Image: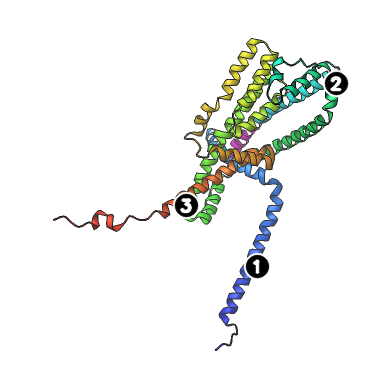
């Protein structure tokens, strides 16, 4: 009898257990340090990977067209994208600044006047009477109305300045993500091989298949959701610039956010159309209405063209992902959130489908034709 004394096997087990715990602790500490260092760059890095996946097809075509010079193809493609992004952003931002400057100049010169409200406003339910009284007071004495609204306008102004600052920083991070994506494009083979190895470690035999499925989902979301949203926002913003809508850049940005969230851009375009009818000629207003209608419903044509067979990701998943990403990471998070949640949904559904297949009972031997007795 050993009398409860530890054996050599117990000592060896305790030693292996201790070594395993120490190794895992050191590995977890190393991962923690790496994540802490990379924390400011996590969103741009994820965005860069997403951009690299989305641009893979045009990048391969461009590289083939210029003789296989991959670095040059990446630089040209990223340069074109940055120009297509920065130039409209500068134009729309300049429009917003000019509108604010003109409004400030008119206010100082006391040239701002508000027309009296229509009589029907007072009959609106709940808010009609108060809105009519406040509107009438503002039309008679704008300065007095602004004094009463001063505290609220100050808070709204501070919120607007902070929001614009966050959006500007988000645009910078978005540009950084595009540059990172361009740097990753020439390393496609190495990146694909690494991704497949990691996927095989995680999901075993189905790893490479899941990796291809996720890549296809990312391309579908970017082309059919984000690509269409960018096209609609830029087209709407340029149209508003042509007719002289104040703050065209802000409205275009709002259209971009709504379109990524899978909400109709007409929520913004309809009030803009009403404004154009109020301040412009009938011909200009009708032409802008036709243009805005085409822009608002262009996703019905663009999505099938850009998405091919279409995305299997439900609208609710894209909405939650883009909204959560926008709250957590600003403008860049708006795009990254939709893509990341779409990836998670795709992997989850693939795992769920595999579980359903594994749970199906095998065909009963009694029901098989081989097991039936032969008829005399």
Question: Which sits in the foreground, 68 or 307?
Answer: 307
Q: Residues within 10 Å of mark 2 (few under 14, many from 20)?
A: some
Q: Residue at x 56, y 79 (%)?
A: 9
Query: Magenta span has 32?
Result: no
- Rendered image quadrant of residue 97: top right
Q: Residue at x 27, y 57 (%)?
A: 366
Q: In screen coordinates, is 376 left or right of 359? A: left
Q: In screen coordinates, is 360 left or right of 171? A: left
Q: Does dot 1 land on a helix, a strand or a loop? A: helix
Question: Which sits in the foreground, 126 or 335?
Answer: 126
Query: Magenta span has 73?
Result: yes
- The label shown at residue 308 is none
Q: Residue at x 66, y 32 (%)?
A: 82
Q: Which residue is mark 1?
A: 22
Q: Is residue 87 visible?
A: no
Q: In screen coordinates, is 39 left or right of 305? A: right
Q: CA distance from mark 2 to mark 3?
A: 69 Å
Q: Are marks 2 and 3 in contact (CB under 8 Å)?
A: no
Q: Is residue 265 above or below residue 192?
A: above
Q: Is residue 50 visible?
A: yes
Q: Does dot 3 land on a helix, a strand or a loop? A: helix
Q: Are marks 1 and 2 in contact (CB under 8 Å)?
A: no
Q: Is residue 331 above or below residue 22?
A: above
- The label shown at residue 143 is 2
- Magenta residues (range): 69-79
- Rendered image quadrant of residue 147: top right
Colour scheme of the rendered structure: rainbow
Q: Which residue is mark 3?
A: 206
For marks 1 and 2, give the one nearer the viewer.
2
């Amino acid at each position: 009898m050993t009398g409860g004394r530890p054996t050599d096997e117990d000592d060896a087990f305790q030693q292996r257990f201790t070594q395993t715990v120490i190794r895992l602790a050191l590995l977890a500490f190393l991962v923690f340090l790496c994540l802490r260092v990379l924390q400011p760059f996590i969103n741009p890095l994820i965005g860069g990977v997403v951009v690299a996946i989305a641009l893979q097809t045009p990048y391969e075509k461009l590289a083939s067209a210029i003789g296989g010079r991959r670095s040059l193809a990446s630089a040209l493609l990223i340069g074109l994208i940055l120009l297509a992004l920065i130039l409209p952003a500068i134009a729309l931002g300049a429009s917003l600044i000019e509108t604010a400057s003109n409004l400030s100049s008119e206010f100082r010169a006391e040239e701002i006047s508000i027309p009296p409200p229509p009589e029907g406003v007072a009959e609106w339910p709940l808010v009609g009477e108060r809105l009519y009284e406040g509107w009438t007071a503002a039309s008679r004495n704008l300065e007095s109305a602004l004094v009463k609204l001063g505290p609220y306008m100050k808070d709204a102004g501070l919120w607007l300045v902070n929001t614009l600052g966050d959006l500007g920083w988000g645009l910078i991070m978005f540009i950084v993500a595009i540059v990172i994506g361009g740097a990753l494009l020439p390393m496609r083979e190495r990146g694909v091989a690494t991704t497949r190895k990691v996927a095989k470690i995680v999901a075993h035999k189905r790893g490479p298949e899941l990796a291809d499925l996720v890549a296809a989902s990312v391309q579908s979301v970017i082309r059919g959701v984000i690509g269409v949203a960018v096209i609609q926002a830029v087209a709407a913003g340029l149209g508003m610039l042509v007719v002289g809508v104040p703050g065209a850049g802000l409205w275009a940005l709002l259209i971009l956010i709504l379109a990524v969230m899978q909400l109709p851009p007409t929520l913004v375009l309809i009030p803009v159309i009403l404004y154009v009818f109020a301040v412009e000629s009938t011909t200009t207003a009708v032409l802008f209405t036709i243009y805005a209608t085409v822009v608002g419903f262009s996703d019905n044509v663009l999505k099938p063209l850009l998405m091919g067979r279409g995305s299997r990701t439900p609208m609710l998943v894209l909405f939650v992902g883009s909204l959560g990403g926008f709250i957590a990471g600003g403008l860049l998070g708006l795009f990254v959130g939709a893509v990341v949640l779409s990836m998670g949904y795709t992997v989850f559904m693939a795992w769920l489908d595999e579980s359903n297949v594994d749970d199906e009972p095998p065909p009963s031997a009694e029901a098989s034709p081989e097991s039936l007795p032969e008829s005399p």
